[in-house]
Amino acid sequence: MEIQTTIQTRRHAETIAFIALAIALGFLCFAMPLIIRTFNPQSFFAQNHQFFVGPAVNTALVLAAIKVRGHTKILSIVLLPSISSIVLGLWFAVGSQFMLYMIPAIWLGNMALVLAFKLLYNRGIKNSEPKQLPKNSTLTAKIKYIELRFMIASIIGIGAKVGVIFGIYAILRAFGVFPPPVASAMWTVMGVNQLITATIGCVIAYGVVKSIQLMKQDKPQINQ
């Protein structure tokens, strides 16, 4: 009974986490840009929305990889930002048709970041922690081990995401898909900007995970 209760509680927590992330992403990717561009299209936020929405999206991707299970839920988080870009672009008639070529690349890049945390962080802790850390290890030692896994997953995940997105962009550019003015603008958007926003997202996600760990650390530990 206790095991079933624990499993049900975990499923409820995962569902709540998914709903919260989906609502936050929906607001950041759809509602907020729509409001800003409608009432003040020349504002700083409207002109530099990638540096606001990008970190939020990457934070959501990392937290979804850690806290949410289920392929459908994960895919919805991965696809939502790009879908919002398409919808908003069509709505404001400013979405360049050339950006549509990059949508699959962004999907693959986001999935690469998610898989890095699924495989290197979640599964890595689950499979290796019993060998690395005895059951009587202090919580502080466990947190340090988790932080190491997080750092490794972040580096590989960010590298994979940026590599996939920029690599596909470079291939399309080499085949002349993008006109010179568009190609020059997208060079930064698909390269350096992706690196910056993915890094900021991982840092924010780490802050969230660290805060949760500290809250658990404050609770009295049993059998320590």
Image (cartoon, helix red, strand yellow):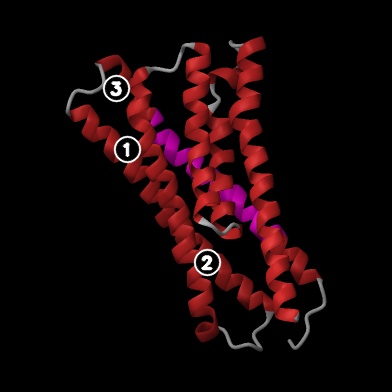
Predominant secondary structure, magenta span: helix
Dot 2 crowding, Cα within 10 Å, few <14, some 14–19, many 20+: some
Residue identifier under label 2: 122
Residue identifier under label 3: 183
On screen, residue 211 versus residue 200, left or right, reads right
User: How far is disc 1 from disc 3 in space, using C-alphas?
Assistant: 12 Å
Residue at left offset 48%, top offset 61%:
118
Q: Nearer the viewer, residue 28 or 214?
A: 28
Indicate the position of residue 47 as horizontal and vertical percent values: 54, 18
SS for tag 1? helix
Would you place residue 21 above or below residue 182 in this image?
A: below
Dot 3 crowding, Cα within 10 Å, few <14, some 14–19, many 20+: many
Dot 2 or dot 3: first in sequence order is: 2
Which numbered disc covers residue 217?
A: none
Q: Nearer the viewer, residue 139 or 19?
A: 19
Q: Are marks 2 and 3 in contact (CB under 8 Å)?
A: no
On screen, residue 96 versus residue 200, left or right, reads left
Would you place residue 64 above or below residue 105 in this image?
A: below
Residue identifier under label 1: 166
On screen, residue 35 versus residue 160, left or right, reads right
